Structures are given as structure tokens and as C-alpha cells.
Amino acid sequence: MRAALGIFCTAAAYQLYRLVGQPNGLPAIFALAAYYLLPAIIVLWVAADAREHRHWRLYDFGSFVFFLWPVIAPIYLFQTRGLCALSTIGVFLAVFLAAMAFAIFMGYPASLQP
């Protein structure tokens, strides 16, 4: 649940920053932090899941997941869960799309300002 909340918050923050017109200053710093926190949250979830289920991992598995999370995380899910990985990927996509919808809802009035 905490991973889903973290994914929602980081995706919403980054999408809101992009929607509002990429302002400078503190919003840019927070958007950069959100951009790097999303893969970090996914790495922490995958590492905790592997530790909990006692799955063997490479030495620097976290770095691979951080840089290649769109590829490595689904491979890990399919190797550990089989076809049940589709439900986890579906939940991730639902949370990510909900974050984008939230950002659109919150940022649309600000995007109309000249």
C-alpha cells in the first residue's frame, strides 16, 4: 500500500509540474526529486518483495532495477508470480493513470492562466 501511495505521489507531482508549464525554482527541484523517487520506490518494493519471498538476486540488482525498471520489474514479476503478475502490473498502471488524472484535475485551471 505504501508503494502504491509513493508511486501515486511521485507520478502526480511530476505530471503536475509538466502540465503547469515547467516553472523554475522550487517546483523544478521537487519535480526532479519526484522523477528520481519513482524508480527508487519501485526498487525498494522489488528488493523488499525478493527478501520477503527469499528469491535469489544479483549483487547489484537494485541498480539494474533503478535504471531499467520498465523492463526489469515486469520480468521479475513474471518470474516470481507467473501470470498473476498481470494483476500487479494492472494495479501499477491504474495508480499511475490515477496520478495523471489527478495532476490534470489540479493543474488544468493553472494551465489556462496566461
Image (tube, grey):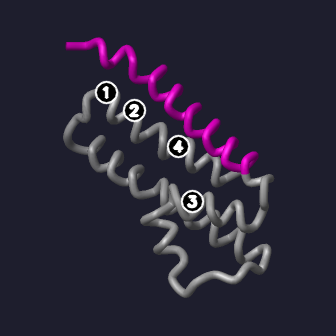
Tags 3 and 4 touching, CB below 8 Å: no
Alpha-carbon span between mark 2 and mark 1: 6 Å
* Residue 22 in which image quadrant: top left
In 3D space, how far apart are the residues under numbered discs 3 and 4 (Cα atoms)? 13 Å
Quadrant of the image containing the C terminus: top left
Structural distance between the alpha carbons of marks 4 and 2: 10 Å
Disc number at residue 78? none
Labels 4 and 1: the sequence-earlier one: 4
For numbered disc 4, what is the local secondary structure?
A: helix
Q: Residues within 10 Å of mark 1 (few under 14, many from 20)?
A: some
| Residue shown at 51% from the left, 55% from the top | 70
Residue to which mark 3 is pinned: 42
Do the numbered discs 2 and 1 sit on residues whose CB atoms are within 8 Å? Answer: yes
Can you tell which quarter of the image residue 110 is in? top left
Q: Earlier in the sequence, mark 3 or mark 1?
A: 1
Q: Position of residue 88 (x, y in %)?
A: 72, 50
Question: Cβ–Cβ below 8 Å for labels 2 and 3?
Answer: no
Residue 16 bears which disc, if any?
A: 2
Of residue 78 and residue 50, the one placed in the foreground of this image is 78
Do labels 4 and 2 touch, CB within 8 Å? no
Where 92 falls versus 102 (above or below)?
below
Q: Which residue, given by chain and number where applicable, does mark 1 sit on?
A: 20
Which callout, 3 or 1, points to the residue nearer the camera? 3
Say which mark, if any, is on residue 9: 4
| Label 2 Cα crowd, 10 Å radius (few <14 / some 14-19 / many 20+) | many
